[in-house]
Amino acid sequence: MGSFARNHPVVFVLASTMAWLVLLLALMGIASSALRTPYDDPITGTVGRLAVTACVLLLVWHLGWMKAAGVTRLGRRQVWLLALGGMVYFAVASLYSLYGQVSFDFSSLIRLPESRTALTTQLVVAMGEEVLFRGLVLYALYSAWGSTRKGTIGSVVVTSLLFAALHLTQVFTHGVSLPSALLLTLETCAVAVWWGALVVVGGSIWPAVMLHFTFNTIAAVQGLAAPTVEPGVLAYTRLLLFSLPLGALGTLMLVRAGPDRVLPEHP
């Protein structure tokens, strides 16, 4: 399977992503039936995502990519510091873009039981999606294309586009308008380029997990205590503009990275 992934990387990542999505829906259905909870209940989603993440990790382990893909490595300290700086920047940008203010209502973490549920849910979401996209998918493309700078950038961009495209489903799952969903998809792609660069240059998926969890949690928890900016298109437009510098920074990191500063090409 490893040789197939390197010889047909695009087919492999598309098939893996589709299998992940179908398996997630099926496992959530099984969890809903076994736990006797609604299909859209947070517990159902958490159990389903944990199960499908275990399947992805098993595949990564079977391919011998656990270390090479950055799953079992903490990464470089400099990249962690860069990630922390970017986390502060985008946390402030997210609060302003979505809620019109830069303050975060920490009291909601204590007052609202839903906020504590959101913490667990978003941690599972971040881990599961990063293991798939910045772990399995990114490394499958990188192991095939990463011998050149152009190929390295291409592996991050294709991974980011695939990850961002899934956010279009929010039109159906969260009632987001199509213009807002398109803006969210572009914003997600820009941020995902930065996350991918952190993984490739730093050698670990865990900075991306931290950032993914932080951004999702801030939006989810603050949304329990404050209304979002109206119209929604304005909020997502602001968020897109703030995300573009991060996408540019990620691209610059990949352009400037030497061959000794990136993931190994083979496990």
Image: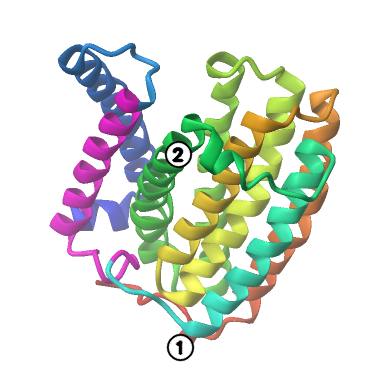
Q: How is the image coloured?
A: rainbow
205 left or right of 107 in image: left
Q: Nearer the viewer, residue 41 or 54?
A: 41
Residue at left 28%, top 52%?
Answer: 5
Report whether residue 259 is seen.
yes
The answer to if 62 sits in the magenta stretch is yes
Residue, disc 1 = 260
Query: Residue 139 placed where, x, y %?
Result: 37, 60
Q: Main secondary structure of the magenta part?
A: helix
Query: Residue 179 placed where, x, y %?
Result: 76, 23
152 shown above or below 127: below
Residue kind at label 1, given as amino acid type: Asp
Query: Residue 58 placed where, x, y %?
Result: 16, 50
Q: Which mark is residue 116?
A: 2
Q: Which mark is residue 173?
A: none
Residue at left 70%, top 40%?
Answer: 186
Residue at left 60%, top 57%?
Answer: 193
Report whether residue 161 is seen.
no
195 shown above or below 169: below
Q: Secondary structure at mark 1?
A: helix
The answer to if 74 sits in the magenta stretch is no
Discs 1, 2 touching: Cβ within 8 Å: no
121 left or right of 258 in image: left
Question: Residue 224 is drawn in which quadrant?
Answer: top right
Q: Secondary structure at mark 2?
A: helix
Q: Work out whether mark 1 precedes mark 2 in sequence or the reverse, and give the earlier one.
A: 2
